[in-house]
Image (cartoon, coloured by chain):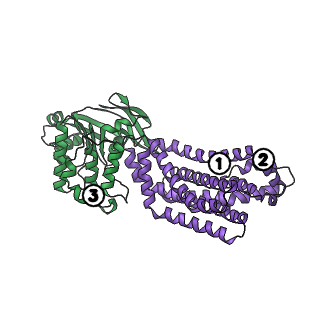
Amino acid sequence: MNRIVKIILSDILKNKIVLVYTLILAVLSWSSFGMEDNTAKGMLTILNVILFTVPLVSILFATIYIYNSSEFIELLVSQPIKRSKIWISLFISLSLSLIISFLIGSGIPLLINAPDFNGIMMLIIGVLITAIFVSLAFFSAIFNRDKARGIGTSIVIWLFFALIFDGLILFLLFQFSDYPIEKPMIFVTSLSPIDLARIQMLLHLDASAMMGYTGALFKEYFGNGIGIAVSLLLLFIWVIIPFVLSLKKFKTKDL
Amino acid sequence: MIEIKNISKKFGKLEVLKNVSASCNSGQCIALIGPNGCGKTTLIKSILGMVIPDSGSMEFNQKSIFGDYLYREKIGYMPQIGRYPDTMTIGEIIEMVKKIRNSKDNLDEDLFRDFEIEKMLNKQMRTLSGGTTQKISAVLAFMFNPDVLILDEPTAGLDPLAAEVLKEKIIKEKGKGKLILITSHLLSELDDLISEIIFMQEGKIFFHKKVNELKEETQEDKISKAIAKILRAN
């Protein structure tokens, strides 16, 4: 496993995109702490950066990289290596490189400005969100033979989770505001990794008051130890499922 | 050595392989010929596990290849069109495959030397001509002393000198008792190489014969003429 991961990692690092991504994250993170006078506000700004930029860059970069390494994959498949090993190595190296970028770009300013539970929580969520969207990239790349369609699918996945899903939730909330839908809402939220991460973070930043009764219920549910564990577990499942599906498909793919 | 039994494969609606069976043993040099799109490359790719057949079984040294990958250590494969990562240099590609194969000893560097790859180690793959890429594919296929060599259109795109070098190398390896599978359209080139012929047509094996039998049956001394005679007779 290590040999292939090493080869792919060194290839990704040769690619300047990851470097630029680290720089952009660093600039955004440092400036959001610099512009706001208190850390909580700075954290909220960073939260938005994490929930908007990180998924987009992760899914797009990973999708394009997978398509561009089709020759590499073809070469490896004819060599004595297990297919699953190739795919898992590709996943590990892509996630690892993007996670390292995130940790250097956003992690350092976060730990300096907010060296508490919230800061660490934010880091964990950023890491998980990166892995989730790399995993979704594998999913969309394996099920589309055509590169343009694959990248299109990835953009739609990102749009859906970053913007459309929120709109749907709002719509549901308004439509069913006369009914006690708070508990179903908790379930619906877990269908989007970005929303799951956002609520998790807002609760820690004590901004849940802005979410009214639903917020209070979320606080009751997500705020305590078990709630945190459950939501982290859900995020983790979001990493596993798309990737395992893509792995299953890759094992039987004709190259 | 390689036992193919009732292999079928469909790409969508297109039936590429229809119930193909064949058996190949060490010491043989088999030519896989047939018109374009008759399933030669698909058959080769299924031996390598790159294409997974819909039905049938395939054995390498009496062991099924489905779900196995270690048998590929014993195969050297030269693809029809070698596709390599653009940004890597020749040296990096060769180093990488060496690392993956994890074999440092017993490397066969004849072609590496004869094709004078040493001078080109720093060239990036995307700057290479088709012929040079073919040379790299050949070097990689022969480098690890495999028991089986699978060569898909090995001389297409090579200059006459390089083609001759490669041909001599194939004859040398054949002498060591290896199994060699070649696909080619240049029948005249195969004359002094091969011992058996598999002729494929529309996804089926039309015939599988020894070269001498074929020549006797048709009373011809050139493979190309013998095959033309058989095709005309049908």
Q: Colour of chain B?
A: green
In-image side of B40 versus B221 (left or right): right
Residue most extreme to the right: A178
SS assignment at label 3: loop
Pointer 2: residues within 10 angstroms few (<14), some, or many (20+)?
A: some
> Who's the residue at 19% across and 47% down the image?
B110
**Marked residue nearer the N-terminal end (1 or 2):** 2
C-alpha distance separating marks 1 and 2: 16 Å
* Chain letter of the residue carrying label 1: A
Q: Which amino acid lies under the numbered mark 3 shown in the image of this protein? A: Leu
Query: Chain coloured purple: which letter?
Result: A
Residue closest to the eye, A95 or B212: A95
Q: Mark 2 belongs to which amino acid?
A: Tyr
Closer to the camera, A64 or A50? A50
Residue picked out by circle 1: A235
Q: Which residue is mark 3?
A: B121
B55 lies above or below A239: above
